[in-house]
Image (cartoon, rainbow, N blue to C red):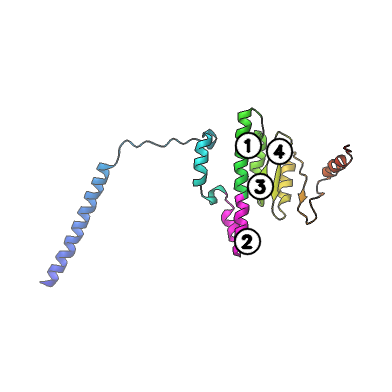
Amino acid sequence: MGVFSTIGTCIGFGIGTSIGVVIGYYVFIYFQPTHVKDPIIRPLAEQDAKTLQQMLPEIPLWIKNPDFDRWIEQASEPNKEAVIKALLGAKEAMLGIRYHMRLMGEAAGVPIEPESQTKLLDATLNLEGVLLAGVPRAGGFDAVFAVTLGDSSSNVTKTWSSLNVLALLVKEDPYGVSLKSVDPRTNEVTSAVSSIHIE
């Protein structure tokens, strides 16, 4: 009798479970909403400033900065990780500054960061080793800057030269800023600047 009882229990359990799954599926289908609205997806450029400011903190760092994970992996010590996070924080802050400068320029009717420079700066930021890129001072069409790490300035020079943009390379030095002479045009610029006498 024990064998038949066990077999009957297993069959009953199998049939009961199958019937429960089928009934659950049809109940789910029956109560599923039929009028689902697709979300309206608009490009970020069409969003207003307030909406963007609310969205930015919700975006994870690895999406805002694709290099985030790779940079953190290279940090072998906790203090290096802190430095890398600070550098990436500076990059994020610079993106915010550029965004607000563009808004300010649009509001004032002045091209602080014109579209051509925005494209150049975005392309520059996508180069390996570029930490910051932006428009100095009041903007316009005459100058941009990039801060690079290590020997990656050659990538910036090549990219900018292909777009007829002259890179005046400077590097950190314990004694101050020094001009690197990579492009022969920089010699013309520096000699012209040094020949100016201000009284």
| Furthest-bottom residue in this view | 2
Q: Which is in the foreground here, disc 3 or disc 1?
A: 1
Instruction: Determine which of the numbered discs, if any, sits on residue 132 in the image.
Output: 3
Residue 68, how many percent across, how many down?
Answer: 58, 54
Q: CA distance from mark 1 to mark 4?
A: 10 Å
Q: Which residue is mark 1?
A: 101
Residue at 67% across, 40% down = 120
Give above or below for 53 relative to 170.
above
Q: CA distance from mark 2 to mark 1?
A: 31 Å
- Sequence order check: which comes first, mark 3 or mark 2? 2
Q: Which is in the foreground here, disc 4 or disc 3?
A: 4
- Magenta: main secondary structure equals helix
Q: CA distance from mark 3 to mark 2?
A: 19 Å
Instruction: Determine which of the numbered discs, if any, sits on residue 65 in the image.
Output: none
- Sequence order check: which comes first, mark 3 or mark 1? 1
* Contact, mark 4 vs mark 3 (Cβ under 8 Å): no
Q: Which residue is mark 4?
A: 137
- Sequence order check: which comes first, mark 2 or mark 1? 2
